[in-house]
Image: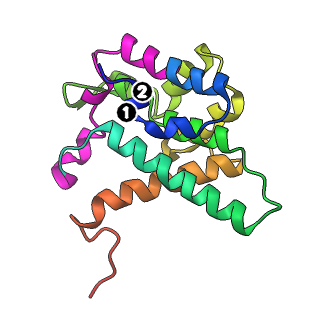
């Protein structure tokens, strides 16, 4: 079984040991309680595979985490007055799609996805592992499907990083973002 540290080496950038342990606990709980035996087996998003090809969740989450860290580091370098909770940002980016193992089974979207719009189930998982409300907000606000807009800089950064990571998957396969010409 893939360890979280192997799947997401960026977790080592977190300085708060307790928060890092909670991130590991949430993912361990998600995999243990889902139909997946290994984090590496969870697909990214089957409805998009016809356009962008097969992709795993780990690769997508790592894209989002790396984008979020780069945005955070750039903003805090150029805007010294801007306070960004870097560990919360990394935790939120690592956990933003933790509900996917419950939304996808056998390559298809399931009832959890239909009845609890992405990422509502994730907030339940985070709360059950005593993850802070701040990180819960980052996770719920990363997707327009949740109906919750980002209210913190950390949530905004993760939402933008996720959008960029998704758009990056489409860039070479579709003209969705490319200008005409």
Residue 65 position, x and y percent, is 49, 46
- SS for tag 2? helix
Q: Against 138, is 77 above or below?
A: below
Q: Quadrant of the C terminus?
A: bottom left
**Left or right position of 115 against 173:** right
Count of numbered labels shown in the rendering: 2
Residue for point 29% across, 40% down? 45
Residues in magenta? 26-52
Question: Alpha-carbon distance for marks 2 and 1?
Answer: 5 Å
The quadrant holding residue 54 is top left
Prevalent SS, magenta region: helix
Which label sits on residue 4?
2
Residue 19 position, x and y percent, is 64, 26
Most extreme residue toward the top is 33
Of 140 and 16, nearer the camera is 16
Residue 164 position, x and y percent, is 44, 59
Q: Are marks 2 and 1 in contact (CB under 8 Å)?
A: yes
- SS for tag 1? helix
Q: Against 35, is 166 above or below?
A: below
The scheme the figure's colours follow is rainbow
Residue 138 position, x and y percent, is 62, 40
Of 13 and 116, nearer the camera is 13
Report if residue 70 lies within the magenta region: no
Q: Against 144, is 6 above or below?
A: above
Which label sits on residue 7?
1
**Left or right position of 151 against 161:** right
């Amino acid at each position: 079984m893939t360890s979280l540290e192997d799947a997401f080496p960026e977790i080592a950038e977190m300085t708060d040991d307790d928060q890092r342990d909670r991130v590991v606990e949430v993912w361990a709980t998600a995999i243990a309680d889902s139909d997946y035996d290994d984090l590496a087996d969870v697909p990214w998003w089957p409805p998009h595979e016809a356009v962008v090809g097969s992709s795993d969740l780990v690769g997508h989450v790592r894209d989002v985490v790396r984008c979020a860290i780069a945005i955070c580091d750039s903003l805090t370098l150029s805007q010294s007055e801007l306070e960004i909770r870097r560990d919360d940002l990394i935790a939120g980016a690592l956990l933003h799609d933790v509900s996917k193992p419950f939304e996808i089974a056998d390559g298809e979207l399931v009832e959890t996805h239909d009845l609890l719009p992405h990422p509502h189930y994730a907030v339940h998982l985070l709360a059950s592992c005593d993850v802070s409300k701040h990180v819960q907000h980052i996770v719920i606000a990363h997707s327009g499907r949740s109906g919750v807009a980002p209210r913190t800089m950390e949530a905004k950064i993760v939402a933008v990083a996720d959008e960029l990571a998704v758009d990056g998957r489409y860039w070479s396969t579709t003209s969705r973002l490319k200008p005409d010409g």
